[in-house]
Image: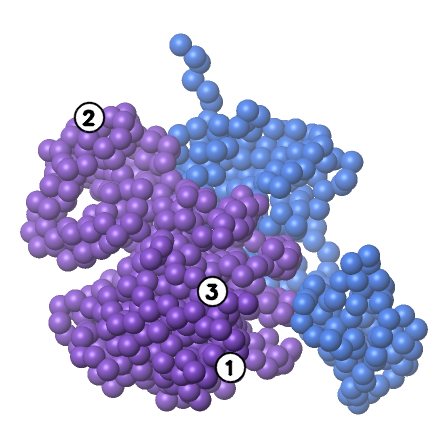
Chain colours: A blue, B purple
Amino acid sequence: MAEPIPGIRATLLCGFLGSGKTTRINRLIRGGKLEDALFLVNDFGSINIDAELIESRDEDVLRLSNGCACCGISGNLSAQLREIKDWPRRPGHLVFEASGIARPRPLMELFDAARGYALEAAESLVDASAFRRHRRDTAIEDIFTAQIREVSRLRVNRAGWLEPDERDAVLREIAAVNPDAEMIVESDEGAPPPAARATTPAPAGPLVSETVNLPHPVDVAALETLLTQSAPALVRAKGTVRADDEARTRYLVQFAGGRVSRTATRYGHTQALVVIGHRGGMLDSLLEALRAL
Amino acid sequence: MTITAYTARAVHTMNPSQPTGQCVAVRDGRVLGVGPLEEIERFGEVRVDDRYADKVLVPGFVEGHSHALEGSIWDYVYLGYFDKYDPEGGYWAGVKSPEAVRDRLAEHIGDGPEDEPLICWGFDPVYFEGERVDKRLLDSVSDTRPIVIMHASLHVMVVNSATIRLAALADKDLEGVMRGADGEPNGELQEIPAMHLVFDALGFDIFDGASNEHALHRYASAARRKGITTVVDLLNPMNDAAIDALRAATGRADYPVRLVPALNALAWDPQAGSERVMDAMRHNHDRLHFGLVKLVTDGAIQNFTARLQWPGYLTGPENGAWNAPPQTFHEMVQHYHGAGLHMHIHTNGDEAIGMILGALDEALAMWPRPDHRHTLQHVQLIRQDQLRRVARLGACLNIFANHIYYWGDIHLTKTLGFDRCQRLEPAASADRMGIPFGIHCDAPVTPLSPLFTAWCATTRQTAGGTVLGEAERISRARALEAITLGAAYTLRMDDRVGSLEPGKWADVTVLDEDPLASDTPLKDIGVHDTLLSGVPTGGG
Ligand SMILES: [Zn+2]
């Protein structure tokens, strides 16, 4: 008779949208402490791994030279768990990134009971700087609270973004939701991004809106860099451009809330950027640079 | 260039300039005209085909919301409460009592190999009186062959002792494993953690195979049988295998419908998802139309999983469940709108509807796009103020008219109460506000049959015989438009299907009776045949 195969040790990573799950997973992968681990993640694209670490890559699974692997979560978790335990290269450890809306308890029960798995740890990540906002939001408050209440370990981040008084109060409020949980407060996180800082000096000039025509294909990365560098003077920018890549991809580019994003699109025919910002030297040089693209 | 003219007792075109015709004349698969034969003859020699001379011709029906699962779920044994027909037209009587459950199981316990589980679907004991269906009833049919009964909600299953043994349920300390007074599992399993043990032990998955070629052929023949010529599979995984199957099935010249698959956006990162759709659109042809993106925001009212505004559910839990955080839906709407794609968004409860209207409002403020035709699906509990917003945002609706018949009695007494039942599926209000809309069945949730759906929208009658919200009834003519041109508009295909107008594809449904002139309830009017691009699909 064959020896009983030891179960795959499962670690559950819960937490609301923006709570830092992706950062945590990237850190775990890079940390390299977990050998032979499979990371089951929501968004494959958000995992950044050094190219030299990648051993192979197919539609579903990314294999790393340190013995780990990374795989996207499919719609049917039950079927996926059945599949994984039958893999020829079966992982010894599974790190499961729950969706931002998942309640931990059913997932804990699933990994606890499922044949071939053993639940090792369930932790929730909590963004201290968003805690009060989420608790006030009636559309999500119940789920957000359950994510804190139902696990045995809380990993609180971005507490350092708060003023000391507020930070202590928020940490107490989190502990009150789940007094029994072990609480780890992350400390080495650096400063908040400019958009989150209420104290960003507001540029003084009046608001102006300018349209820049971009009739030729442009270097989209360069365009994004220009917008990001001019963030203090910019309120908003948006437009459609044609990239100078081989496919001449058409992108919607937008700058809002301090962030640039782009979307490949099949919509729109104009190629121009509307820039809304505060008049001054910074805006002028941005417009000049855009026209030179 | 041959011209074929199908003559008929009556022709309803859904073209306001020419609402009726005398025949449907076809050339090159398109409608050449519906006028008098002698006028059509000016185009050249006409071959008259009078096989439908005593029938009534209407535009081919467009089902804007169903699932290819309809083509694979019938591989299992039907145990639902209501009578149904399988894709081959076989009749399955509804199962209305525990005894009937036992009889149906006994009838099929010999099907297939003894060591494979007998799997049943569609079970809905909410309508039953008396004794609870648990392992004892199943064991009385067999305690050696595993039996699994899936509830219609897909959140619960009932299994027999053979299954309990195989999945080793007795020693699992799990909330979802229901137990009797003796502490032993009673056979009822609730939610995924418990049900997974059975899927795992027996190695089956009820959703498996919904996107293979075989299922797509069964799905199409089920649709054709009910007069559908364009059908939407509104939640396709669109992985490589699924796309290959769609291309292979629709690539056959005898595939009897036009198929419109929508990407299941929640299974994709938005950037990858929009690229996948744009890539797939290169494969579009007459019978295959990629381009739709489906978002599912909340659950279903009868399962208490729809997101409701105040005062929440009449009985049961306070509120339902989101499928992703509202913020994620905002970002997805912004992304797919920005990508120039066409979204169809499942929203049942009024809280979910409000959230999505907010997201659309934002996306349209950022990227104004007239004629976007983003469509809210189901919209069962939509409020009047939300309807006004829909109209202002230029969005469309696809209304779940069948729901009132199947769950209206439950909504009245268990989920919503009297007042909110009056406003369910408000087709007349949508019409009054000029909102383009279709009506749908969501098969296999309810049966695939546009005439039945149209009947529901005109009567608003529950299975128990109660009429809910008389003020929201629509006329037969309006209902016929909703299952043809209305649905085609929400798919941005109204330039090709949905009405019988020169230049459009000659997709026709052939009926035994006149849906507008006769008094026969719409649901009882027979579908005789369909034509796709002017070719009869029924083989004569
Ligand atoms: Zn559906």
What kind of element bears circle 1? Answer: helix
Asked if labels 1 and 3 touch by Cβ distance under 8 angstroms, the answer is no
Front-most of B382 and A143?
B382
Q: Chain of mark 3?
A: B
Q: Are both tags, 3 and 1, on one chain?
A: yes
Q: Residue at x 64, y 57 (%)?
A: B282
Which mark, by number, is residue B42?
A: 1
Q: Is residue B162 left or right of residue A247?
A: left
Q: Is residue B69 shown above or below B460? A: above
- Asked if residue B396 shows in the view, the reply is no
Point out residue A214 in the picture as x, y percentages from the top left corner. 84, 75
Q: Amino acid at mark 3?
A: Ser
Distance of mark 2 from mark 1, alpha carbons? 73 Å
Q: Is residue A270 shown above or below A208? A: above
Which mark, by number, is residue B533?
A: 3
Distance of mark 3 from mark 2, alpha carbons? 52 Å
Which image quarter: residue B193? top left
Distance of mark 3 from mark 1, alpha carbons? 22 Å
Which mark, by number, is residue B144?
A: 2
Point out residue B343 in the picture as x, y percentages from the top left corner. 52, 68
Q: Amino acid at mark 2?
A: Thr
Q: Are both tags, 3 and 2, on one chain?
A: yes
Q: Residue furthest top?
A: A1
